[in-house]
């Protein structure tokens, strides 16, 4: 019989995702065939599995930590907020529909069946499953409708460890309040973890003893505040990060902080580069003083495009390009760079045609079908990159087609043998549908070196191995959990 352990939190952003990832790495190192599971995730950071399904990026990271291939069964329900129209509902990797909250709650039975089916599939394949909850289990207005917290604990019979974030303040009140509001479901909570602690442990210890006395639930670990782990963030909370240059002569890369920004983890690899300063901004001084500007993906491309126009950012971009500052668009950003975005089915807007930024001689037609593929690619003729780069990996997640004749990349989708063109350029402006393109180390370094040469700096020969550094970050995080959690207690929970 499959064993399971569930990590819930007193709220969103308390560190559940990373704790699940760290535990998956610990169990993997013990030789246990382990996998993550999150029945329902609401996130704009997503990943495409080998079978062409879309899941939350956090579950892809957790699968990586567990040393297993990400699967749609690890995150059977993905909700992607689209604005006033509600959220796009992705079931087992494929788009079902867009719903408002009240409609989704009526849809609960169908969603719950998908969760149950995914769990049955996972339980046949793995020895141990580490489950992540969402938000707080004590949202008493949702207790009858939720399918991600105690409903999953009950269905799977999983012991629950509840995580509280002390950095927010009121951690003991949030732990106690959660237990008090759960009534009978509180019996599933077997332990507390206090996360993001900075201070003197001796001052904290009396509180740990008192919360156990009041709830009967022990605190089995206090995790220190460690800042940026160098791992993918679950949501937009992490994009405040600005990475200063190590050599004092930074290559400044500005990613436009769109209102509906998605898959901003595309740019995490730049955080590891010693000569790059990465920032997310819409400020004039940041845009004009950049060495490279990137328009990222968007969950509502039309709305973000109109916002750039109405707020004056479009004029700033035109000014920047006139000063020979390179501009790159990824996915939705690529669509914005063209002449027009046509939306005949009202996928994103009541407007049938919306004028693009007109940097590229392309047109995009939004469709009702979403393209989700892992891809292999080779670059053909990329601005700032002297020669083509082969063996590139990435993935596509987009609604719409942008036909091109030659393209900047030749890509092969999934298991298909057909090679198709992708991307377009005009001077120093170019765009592509390929998410994860900057994960490719040689491609990323070639681009940065092109920027260095343009500024009069010598290129750097050292190529940073992003995947290896991320793997080391997972190991360091797992070591920190081992040092600060009562692993013997946890092992008894899953035995």
Image (cartoon, grey):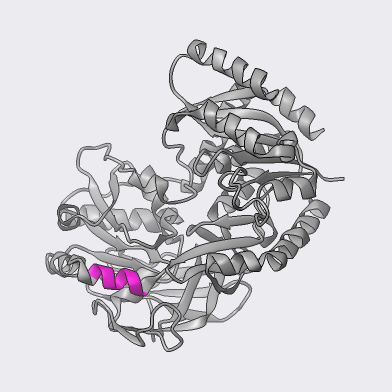
Query: Could you say which is closer to the camera, residue 163 or residue 417?
Result: 163
Q: What is the magenta segment's predominant secondary structure?
A: helix
Q: Position of residue 17 (x, y in %)?
A: 57, 43
Q: Does the magenta stretch include residue 303?
A: yes
Q: Judge left or right: residue 288 versus residue 263.
A: left
Q: Residue at x 32, y 41 (%)?
A: 274
Residue 96's quadrant in the figure?
Answer: bottom right
Query: Could you say which is closer to the camera, residue 303 or residue 397?
Result: 303
Q: Judge left or right: residue 493 versus residue 9.
A: right
Q: Judge left or right: residue 159 versus residue 483.
A: right
Q: Is residue 372 magenta?
A: no
User: Quick check: can you spot residue 93?
Assistant: no
* Identity of the residue furthest to the top in this view: 202
Q: Residue at x 65, y 50 (%)?
A: 143
The range drawn in magenta is: 302-308
**Image quarter of the N terminus:** top right
User: Quick check: can you spot residue 316?
Assistant: yes
Q: In this view, does 40 lie above or below 210?
A: below
Query: Could you say which is closer to the camera, residue 270 or residue 131?
Result: 131
Residue 369's quadrant in the figure?
Answer: bottom right
Q: Is residue 92 above or below residue 458?
A: below
Q: In this view, does 327 lie above or below 193?
A: below
């Amino acid at each position: 019989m499959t064993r399971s352990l569930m990590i819930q939190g007193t709220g969103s952003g308390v560190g559940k995702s990373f704790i699940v990832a760290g535990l998956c790495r610990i169990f993997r190192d013990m030789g246990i065939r382990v996998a993550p599971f999150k029945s329902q995730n609401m996130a704009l950071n997503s990943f495409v599995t080998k079978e062409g399904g879309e899941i939350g990026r956090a579950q892809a990271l957790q699968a990586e930590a567990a040393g297993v291939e990400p699967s749609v069964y690890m995150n059977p329900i993905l909700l992607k907020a689209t604005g006033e129209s509600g959220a796009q509902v992705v079931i087992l990797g494929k788009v079902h529909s867009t719903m408002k909250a009240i409609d989704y709650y009526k849809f609960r039975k169908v969603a719950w069946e998908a969760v149950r089916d995914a769990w049955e599939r996972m339980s046949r394949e793995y020895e141990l499953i580490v489950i992540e909850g969402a938000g707080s289990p004590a949202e008493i207005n949702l207790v009858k409708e939720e399918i991600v917290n105690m409903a999953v604990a009950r269905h799977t019979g999983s012991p629950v460890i509840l995580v509280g974030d002390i950095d927010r303040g009121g951690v003991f009140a949030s732990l106690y309040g959660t237990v008090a509001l759960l009534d009978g479901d509180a019996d599933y909570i077997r332990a507390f973890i206090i996360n993001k602690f900075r201070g003197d442990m001796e001052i904290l210890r009396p509180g740990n003893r008192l919360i156990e006395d009041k709830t009967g639930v022990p605190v089995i670990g206090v995790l220190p505040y460690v800042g940026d782990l160098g791992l993918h963030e679950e949501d937009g909370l992490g994009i405040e990060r600005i990475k200063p240059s190590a050599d004092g002569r930074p290559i400044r890369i500005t990613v436009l902080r769109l209102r509906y920004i998605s898959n901003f983890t595309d740019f995490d690899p730049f955080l590891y580069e010693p000569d790059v300063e990465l920032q997310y901004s819409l400020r004039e001084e940041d845009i004009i003083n950049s060495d490279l500007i990137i328009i990222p993906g968007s969950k509502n491309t039309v709305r973000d495009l109109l916002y750039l126009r109405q707020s004056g950012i479009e004029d700033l971009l035109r000014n920047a390009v006139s000063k020979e500052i390179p501009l790159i668009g990824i996915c939705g950003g690529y669509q914005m760079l063209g002449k027009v975005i046509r939306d005949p089915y009202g996928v994103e807007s009541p407007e049938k045609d919306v004028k693009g930024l007109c940097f590229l001689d392309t047109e995009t037609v939004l469709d009702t079908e979403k393209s989700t593929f892992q891809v292999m690619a080779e670059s053909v003729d990329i601005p700032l990159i002297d020669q083509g780069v082969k063996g590139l990996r990435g993935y596509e997640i987009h609604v719409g087609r942008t036909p091109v004749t030659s393209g900047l990349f030749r890509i092969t989708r999934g298991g298909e043998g057909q090679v198709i063109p992708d991307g377009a350029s005009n001077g120093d402006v170019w765009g592509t549908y390929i998410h994860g393109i900057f994960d490719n180390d040689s491609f990323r370094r070639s681009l940065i070196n092109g920027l260095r040469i343009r500024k009069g700096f010598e290129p750097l020969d050292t190529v940073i191995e992003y995947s290896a550094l991320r793997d080391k970050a997972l190991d360091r995080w797992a070591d920190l959990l081992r040092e600060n959690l009562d692993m013997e207690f946890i092992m008894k929970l899953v035995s």
